[in-house]
Image (cartoon, rainbow, N blue to C red):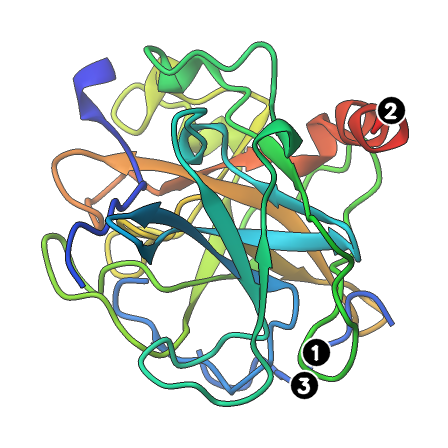
Amino acid sequence: MLRLLSPLLFVALASGYGQTSFHPSSRVVNGEDAVPYSWPWQISLQYEKDGKFSHTCGGTLITPDWVLTAGHCISSSRTYQVVLGEYDRGVYEGPEQVIPINPGDLFVHPKWNSNCVSCGNDIALIKLSRSAQLGDTVQPANLPPAGDILPNDAPCYISGWGRLSTGGPLPDKLQQALLPVVDYQHCSRWDWWGFSVKKTMVCAGGDAQSGCNGDSGGPLNCPTENGTWQVHGVTSFVSSLGCNTLKKPTVFTRVSAFNDWIEEVIASH
């Protein structure tokens, strides 16, 4: 089963909290262009190669000084920067904030094992070298309460700059796609993800819409009853058979299983 796991990392070798202007009236693979700056906590994590920074993962701004992303997005041998207020990566639009990351400010969960994606704990925190300037285009996300579990078919949205199809092109504009939650009871069935999915994970989507390479670390955005949004997931893996494979929903690290760790890291640094 482990051979079916494919972290959604993309290494580019070429070239009020919880508020958003997006309303889910319409409905990443088979997604659509997001409304510009409608996910103001979305960030682009970029690494340096040959003097140039390239997008590798997504992430979520959770305080003015901290970003949440996936453990498999982080390598101690790389130099990173975070870009906030990004929409179209192909042009400079004005709201972008480019913030360098100091090497000692990368915090991967201590139980993350890069040789066992399905073991869980695919989560990391990044401390920004300076505080984000908050405004209409840059806002921290709300996180769910500890232990919160989404019901089956909850209407969540993935967002990111990942491939538009398996092996396909990377978009310039931020994409979004509706990924209804698949609860643990269904997702852990033998012909779905089986033992590869843990209760500290969230499954969402299906064979039509999914995350893909380059979406790693980005948010699973879920609406609340009061009209705000919470980030319930950190994009982790899909099937190596393809990004949009039947009975292999996109798998996310469940944020509400790691509230204590997030709070501890932030408080101690």
Figure check: 232 above or below 29: above
Q: Which residue position holds label 1? A: 20
Q: Between tags 2 and 1, which lies in front? A: 2
Please state which of residues 109 and 166 is positioned toward the viewer in this rendering: 109
The residues bearing labels 3 and 2 have C-alpha atoms spaced at a distance of 34 Å
Query: Is disc 3 in contact with disc 1, using a CB cutoff of under 8 Å?
Result: yes
Q: Residues within 10 Å of mark 3 (few under 14, many from 20)?
A: few
Secondary structure at badge 2 equals helix
The residues bearing labels 3 and 1 have C-alpha atoms spaced at a distance of 4 Å
Quadrant hosting residue 151: top right
Farthest residue in the front direction?
51
Q: Going 58% across and 44% down the picture, which residue do you hit?
A: 233
Q: Which quadrant does the N terminus fall into?
A: top left
Please state which of residues 130 and 188 is positioned toward the viewer in this rendering: 130
Query: Is disc 2 in contact with disc 1, using a CB cutoff of under 8 Å?
Result: no
Question: What's the residue type where badge 2 is placed?
Answer: Ser
Q: Between tags 3 and 2, which lies in front? A: 2
Q: Residues within 10 Å of mark 2 (few under 14, many from 20)?
A: few
Figure check: 44 above or below 227: above
Give residue 107's position: percent from left, percent from top: 63, 26
Q: Which residue position holds label 3? A: 21
Q: Which residue position holds label 2? A: 268
Please state which of residues 113 and 14 is positioned toward the viewer in this rendering: 14
Question: What's the residue type where badge 1 is placed?
Answer: Thr
Q: Is residue 223 visible?
A: yes
